[in-house]
Image (tube, rainbow, N blue to C red):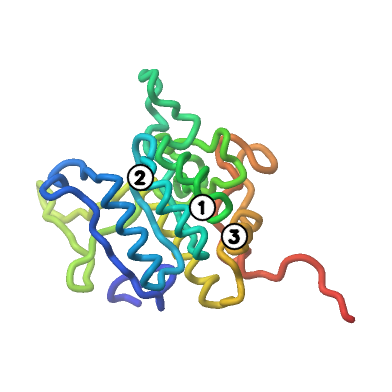
Amino acid sequence: DDIGIVGIAYQATIMALRADGRGTCRSECSFSDSDIAAAVRHAVDNGANVVNLSLGGGSPSSVMLSAVRYAASKGVVVVVAAGNDGDVYDDPAIDPDRPDPFAQGLRDAGGGAVIIVGSVNEQREISDFSNRAGGYEGTYLTALGESVCCTYEDGKLYEEPAPGGGTYVYLFSGTSFAAPQVSGAVALLAQAFPNLKATEIVQILLDSARDAGDPGADAVYGSGILDIAAAFAPQGTTSLA
């Protein structure tokens, strides 16, 4: 609108809940499972349709798994970033060809109410840094998460002076920026079709994804690339009684 950004689900209400450790975000934020789990339960109990988790790491604790099961039982979709270890091949503890352990654990706990999200670039190619779908092809979706523009301040594009003159803007990359796009798509479907269950919304987004990589669900792109227009298009066949 030539003023600022409104996002995908532009009529959604955002419930922003902090779960980072105090003072940890000077470099990389640190989160405890108990705080994340408390935030998930608070969101569910206060009317959220979808919970976005743009974070990841090691295997989730039992309290975190319990919170995701609770969200799924209440009909809430959980969207979690796949991880940014896709270009790490020299650490035996990291498998870049699979979602990170945090995402895997949440999917195993929440079943069909959880979507794992990887990143693609503007050319619709998997981002080098993105964890791949291996083993979770049927629940993994990708969205633009590479060189995402920008920072806004007071509704205006934030620009920094560049050395030698001119200005530059900030671009961001990571599966953390891809996941909210899928969460926005969930919110749109929930708004337009309130009769849909969480698992039905998830399945629609997976089924309508734009195919990429090998035909069908594959170990890199999973179910494909988020396609909101296709998700809203009629599916199946129509019959008259």
* Snapshot quadrant of residue 92: top left
Classify 74 as above or below 82: below
Q: Earlier in the sequence, mark 1 or mark 2?
A: 1
Viewer-closest of 120 and 75? 75
- The kind of residue tagged 3 is Thr
Give the number of the disc on residue 174.
2
Viewer-closest of 212 and 46? 46
* Snapshot quadrant of residue 82: top left
Q: Are marks 1 and 2 in contact (CB under 8 Å)?
A: no
Q: Earlier in the sequence, mark 2 or mark 3?
A: 2
Q: Nearer the viewer, mark 2 or mark 3?
A: 3
Question: Where residue 129 sits: x, y (%)?
Answer: 39, 36
Whether residue 123 is visible to the viewer of this picture, yes or no, is no
Q: Residues within 10 Å of mark 3 (few under 14, many from 20)?
A: some
- The kind of residue tagged 1 is Val
Is 224 displayed left or right of 83 in the figure? right
Question: Where residue 88 sits: x, y (%)?
Answer: 37, 26
| Residue assigned mark 3 | 199
* Snapshot quadrant of residue 217: top right
Question: Which element is circle 3 on?
Answer: helix
Give the number of the disc on residue 223.
none
Residue farthest along the right direction in this orientation: 241
